Image (cartoon, rainbow, N blue to C red):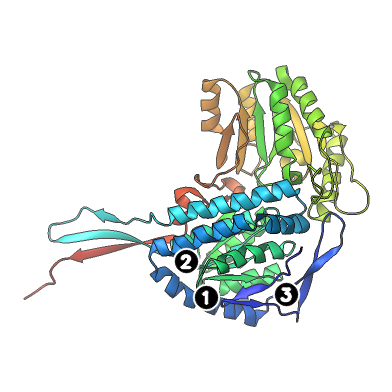
Amino acid sequence: MYDTPAMFIAGEWIDSRASSGAVKNPANGEVLGSFPHAGPADLERAVDAAEAGLRDWRALMPAERCAVLARAAGLLRDRIEEIARIVTLEQGKPLAEARGEVLGAARLLDWDAVAGRHIYGQVVPSDAGSRVTVVYEPIGVVAGFAPWNFPLSSSVRKIGSALAAGCSVILKTAEKTPATGTALVRCLADAGIPRGVVGLVFGEPAAISEFLIGAPAVRMITLTGSVGVGKLLAAQAGAQMKPSLMELGGHAPVIICDDVDAAAVGRLAAGTKFRNAGQICTAPSRFIVHDDVYEPFVESFVEATRSLRVGDGMDAATTMGPLTNPDRCEAMERMIADAQGRAATVRTGGHRIGNRGNFFEPTVLTDVDVEAEVMRDEPFGPVAPIVRFDDLDKAVALANAVPYGLAAYAFTNSATRAGMLAERIESGGLAINQFVGSMPESPFGGVKDSGYGREGGCEGVRAFLTSKSVFHRYAAPSS
């Protein structure tokens, strides 16, 4: 039921236990297994293999590369039950959500398999007797760092577009979810990825990132992670003139205007907020509601929240699983206490559940002070603060008042208001009258402290390409 994690280096599965770490089930604290730590020799071998694999991979026609990705997507679908169970055991989300993540990862690979076929160059107007062309080439070996909250789909975002662009990739997955990374790479290996083109390593994050970023053969890094880690890795990469793609934290505002059915929006908002126990960087996490519809929204939101069933994600009846990290429970308690100290009301929830596993009640806070910690810092957990507004300009100012800018949401039936919000909200993505954080066909990324660069859409493959201008005069000079 639990796939033993193993590193994948130079086309071989490595299960060295000279140094290892434990993987725990967040629902009960039990040890699921252990995973190997990569040492310097492992990492050096992975880099050498990726450099050698790059030469062969970039030489293939795009259609050949993309056929491998398409086959891997098919294998993800074929193995959906097996992989979903691994995701739930390691990360905690309900099985239904884990199945959704597997299908979402397959969709991402499907898109990359299409986008990689459309890497076109340009012909630039030039003088008679010469031609200027612009060609796009893979940037080289990429080091990808994936998080634990969406261990499968985030890993695909790290490697799918890079592979489609003709790059080789060394993937470092989170220590809490190593078997999920193993399952993904098995799909790629079984789909026929050539030796060395994909590597998979685990271990101590700082040591691995320092080694990979410092390796001359590694030409780019891509990370989904916290703002603090992103800034650290970006600085390390920048010191060596290596580009990076950063998808970092968020604190998404939700503006609810007075011209919508607030009760219907409240039910939808609660269902979205507590997906994956709120551990989503694009999760709606600050609800800014017009005075005239505040109470109907709150009542509906609270009622929907109370209907959630918290439990082990392996139980089909569970609608919200545990937090993956035990320290997130402590963070929730701290944020709730801070909000209460500023006169906020706990309308439901507010406490840890039991003393086994990382379970926390889905919590709704009302009339929250805008200076409360939960309004300023990303909660990354099942706590929903709700505040009032009476003027849309004030709502926009509050939405933009944090250093994050990944996702944002708004509900209004006014085209004028929707247009104004689309222009003024500071975020990488804005969803109006729906909760859509990303899709394979559109670019995904943030502004401000939420990072830079884009995954997905046409921009996803372009991020892993460099342009080369070729100035060609048809005849060489003669005397």
Quick one: label 2 or label 3, which is nearer the N terminus? 3
Q: Amino acid at mark 1?
A: Arg
Task: For label 2, count other residues whose C-alpha is less than 10 Å away and answer few (under 14), some (14-19) or many (20+).
Answer: many
Q: Quadrant of the N terminus?
A: bottom right
Give the numbered dot on residue 62.
none
Badges 1 and 2: C-beta atoms under 8 Å apart? no
Q: Amino acid at mark 2?
A: Cys
Badges 2 and 3: C-beta atoms under 8 Å apart? no
How far across and down, in percent of the image, does residue 141 sit?
Answer: 50, 69
Compared with residue 392, is residue 333 higher up or lower down, i.e. above or below? below
Q: Name the residue that disc number 3 marks.
A: 36
Quick one: label 3 or label 1, which is nearer the N terminus? 3
How far across and down, in percent of the image, does residue 465 sit?
Answer: 43, 60
How far across and down, in percent of the image, does residue 293 sit?
Answer: 72, 19
Q: Name the residue that disc number 2 marks.
A: 167
Secondary element under disc 2, as helix, strand or loop, is loop
Give the residue at x 30% y 59%. 134
Give the numbered dot on residue 195.
1
